[in-house]
Amino acid sequence: MSGRKRFFVGQLNYPKCTEAVLDGEEFIHAKTVQRVEEGTEIILLDGSGREYTAIVAKIEKRSLVAHITAAAEGDKEPQIEMYLLCGALKGDKTELVVQKATELGASKIGVFSSEYCSAFINENKLDRLNKVAREAAKQCMRSCAPKVVYFDNFTSALKSAEGFENKLFACEFAKSSDADIMNISGSTALVIGSEGGFSDSEFAFAKDSGFYGVTLGKRILRAETAAISLLSLVAFALGELK
C-alpha cells in the first residue's frame, strides 16, 4: 500500500468537528504495524465514501487523536452496485473470496449455507470476514469496505438480492447461459455455490426467483475460482475494470 496510511474510524462530523479518535484494532495496527507517530499525516475513512486527511496530534496508550485538515470524496468506489452471494467455503477460502471481491469492487458480500454446504459461519468468523474486507479496502485504496453478511439458509440469501436489475446464478450443471454477461448493465447480484455446489431444487428455486443461470465454461472450477472469475466478468462488463 502506497501513500499515506489509511484507517477506518467511526462516523465523522467534519467540518463541525475537526478531531477524530482512532482506537481498537485500527489503533493497534497504526501503532505497532504502521509505526505511526505524532505529526504523521494519515487518511481516515468512516464508510461514507469520503476520505479525511488528518495529522496525528497525540498518541496515548490505547488510542490516538488526529486533527482533520481536509476532506474529499474517494474516487475508487464502484459506480454500479455489485452484490456477491457465495456459499460458505471450507478453511480460509471464504476469506480469500471476500478479499478479492473487495478489490474487484463488490458493494456487498453475502455468505450463505445451502443444501450441500459443509462449512459453517459463526459470529467470530463473520467478524473476521468483515475485518478482511476492511483490510482489503485499505490496500486497494477504496473509501468504503463492503459489509459481509451471513444467511443461515438459501432462501433468505436469494431474497436479499431483490431489487437488483440483473440476477445471475452460476451452476455447474447448467447446460447453457440464460444471460449474456458481457451485455449486462445496471446493478447486479451474482450467486456462487460452496464446494458441494447446488441441488436441482435449489437451481429451480433460483430460476423461479428471477435468477438467470450462467455457466463459466466447460471446466469445473473450484468454488473460490468461480466466485472471483464471475465477479471479474461482471465488473468488466459494467465498466468497473476499464
Image (spheres, helix red, strand yellow):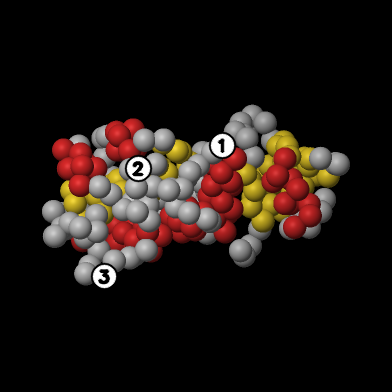
How far, Cα to Cα, is label 1 from label 2? Answer: 18 Å
Foreground residue among 112 and 232: 112
Residue 67 in which image quadrant: top right
- Secondary structure of the residue carrying tag 1 is helix
Ranked by sequence position, the earlier of labels 2 and 3 is: 2
Q: Is residue 21 above or below residue 117?
A: above
The residue tagged 2 is: 114
The residue tagged 3 is: 219
Q: Residue at x 33, y 51 (%)?
A: 193
Q: Residue furthest right?
A: 61
Q: Residue at x 74, y 45 (%)?
A: 27
> Of the residues shown, which amino acid type is indicated by label 1?
Glu
Disc 1 crowd rating (10 Å Cα; few below 14, some 14-19, many 20+) is few
Q: Which mark is residue 123?
A: 1
Residue 82 in picture, x, y percent from top left:
34, 48
Foreground residue among 3 and 122: 122
